[in-house]
Amino acid sequence: MRAAVVDAFTDRAFSGNPAAVVLLPAEGPAPSPDWMQSVAAEFALSETAFVSSLGNSQYRLRWFTPELEVELCGHATLATAHWLLEQGLQTGPMSFRTMSGWLRAEGVPGSVTISLPLVPVVDTRAPDGFDQAMGFINYQLIGFTGQSVALQRNALVLVDATDLRDMQVNLRRLTALPLGGVIATAAADEPARAKGIDVLSRYFAPALGIDEDPVTGSAHSTLAHYWCHELGTTGFRAAQVSPRGGLLDVDLDDSEDETLVRVSGRAVTTMDVELRV
């Protein structure tokens, strides 16, 4: 099987968020989830995407961390669309059938745009031990997303930009909570605003096997709901200030029956791989 490693939300190799993309056969029996999980553990990246063609620019897409399958992943979706376009396997807009419904992607000059479902916070009741998991940092709890499966839920917290850059959560305590992860965010400080950036974030998800995700497209499905209201806008430029870092352009799109979040970014393929087992 053909596979690749793609750095998403960056225009430089070895930055942004790396995702593995595995192209599955369009015909014949599908590989088992256990096999896909083993491959994801072997790549040991925050996400491995498994994609197979359904014909007519439609694809089946699944995402696995080194620990488990997840319902939504933005950067691996962008990486998949980038690689399909780069390899000439796809020449125009495409749709992915996923656990979160149909997602659309298209290449635009210099980048790829993906459409994700809006994921607002719906609950402000913090589980016991949440404050201790946040470590020694001042934060404002905005709330929790509403997925029924605990490991798919995220907390959203607001912090100062300086605290965000220096932030260290208690990974052991965070892993023990009924959460997938914590999205920490701040309004851009002056150095970031000078670069046209409006919003900063980081994402910690040790329960998913990802102590800190370098750049998290799906987290911006929640950040869009919060920041578009706070900024009084329908779009913003975001930077995830992890050690690798990355840039995203985020826009709300309410032209459909449901409000979608359009996330755009660049990507760079760093490896082409052949799976031999």
Image (cartoon, rainbow, N blue to C red):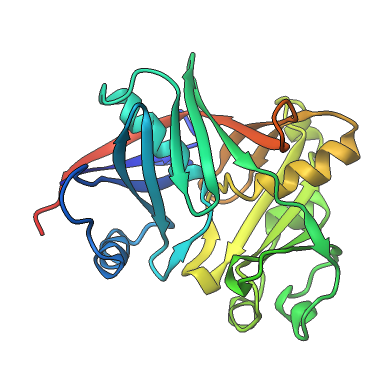
Q: Quadrant of residue 234?
A: top right
Q: Is residue 89 left or right of residue 185?
A: left
Asked if one can make out residue 12 in the rendered structure from this viewpoint, the answer is: no
Q: Is residue 263 left or right of residue 145?
A: left
Residue at point 61% right, 71% down? 149
Q: Measured along the vertical axis of the image, is residue 142 above or below residue 241?
A: below
Q: Position of residue 28 (x, y in %)?
A: 15, 50
Tell me where residue 60 appears, x and y as whole percent.
37, 45
Q: Is residue 245 left or right of residue 161?
A: left
- Give the x, y percent position of residue 44: 34, 62
Q: Residue at x 46, y 36 (%)?
A: 78
Give the answer, above or below, for where 6 lies relative to 49.
Answer: above
Judged left or right of residue 219, residue 61 is: left
Q: Nearer the viewer, residue 201 or 235?
A: 235
Q: Looking at the picture, how far across and down is residue 186, in whole percent?
A: 79, 48
- Farthest residue, direction top: 109
Q: In the depicted view, which residue is nearer to us: 28 or 213?
A: 28
Question: Which residue is pictured at 19% across the width and 45% down the height?
Answer: 25
* Residue appearing at x 49%, y 33% in the figure: 10
Q: Name the residue at the left extreme.
A: 276
Picture quarter containing residue 184?
A: bottom right
Query: Is residue 133 something one can see in this rendering?
Result: yes
Q: Out of 236 and 23, give the one closest to the viewer.
A: 23
**Looking at the image, how many numbered discs can be counted on the residues?**
0
Q: Is residue 122 above or below residue 12?
A: below
Quadrant of the rendering where the C terminus is positioned = bottom left
Residue 113 sits in quarter: top right
